[in-house]
Amino acid sequence: MTNQHKQRIQKMYDAGMSVSKIADTLGIPRSTVQSFLKKLKTEDDCNACKNCGEAILITAGHRPRQFCSICCSSAVVSDSISIIP
Ligand SMILES: [Zn+2]
């Protein structure tokens, strides 16, 4: 699968096309489209900051971070502390 394929899959999926329709249009197996979309969703989930939802840049070889900055991670920590009576 080429990068062009990936971009087109993403666009067509965003436009509301079904997996089989995308696969037929690009002439690639449905399973390929499906696994790509699954990977895309997973990446979306762990790339967002848990505090502000800002996208986090993943550095190759490093574990995905939960927060975009130290400010956000400490904001969540101080929030949970202030809840304690
Ligand atoms: Zn953040």
Image (spheres, grey):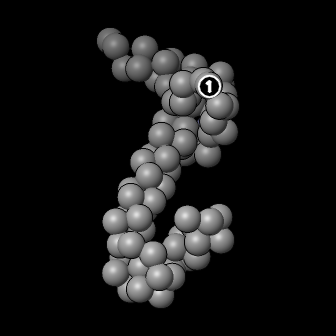
Q: How many marks?
A: 1
Q: Residue at x 54, y 25 (%)?
A: 63
Locate the N terminus and report the quarter of the image it occupies: bottom right
Question: Would you place residue 64 above or below residue 42 in this image?
Answer: above
Residue 25 image offset from top left, x and y in percent:
47, 87
Horizontal side of 14 relative to 61 (left or right) equals left
Residue 6 image offset from top left, x and y in percent:
57, 67
Q: Residue at x 47, y 82 (%)?
A: 27
The residue wearing badge 1 is 61
Question: Would you place residue 26 above or below residue 83 in this image?
Answer: below
Q: Nearer the viewer, residue 81 or 56?
A: 56
Q: Residue at x 41, y 64 (%)?
A: 32
In the rendered image, is residue 17 in sight?
A: no
Q: Quadrant of residue 62?
A: top right
Q: Amino acid at mark 1?
A: Gly
Q: Residue at x 44, y 52 (%)?
A: 39
Horizontal side of 35 relative to 44 (left or right) equals left
Q: Quadrant of residue 36?
A: bottom left
| Secondary element at tag 1 | loop
In the rendered image, is residue 25 in sight?
A: yes
Q: Residues within 10 Å of mark 1 (few under 14, many from 20)?
A: few
Residue 81 image offset from top left, x and y in percent:
43, 14
Locate the C terminus and report the quarter of the image it occupies: top left
Q: Nearer the viewer, residue 48 or 74?
A: 48
Q: Nearer the viewer, residue 23 or 50?
A: 23
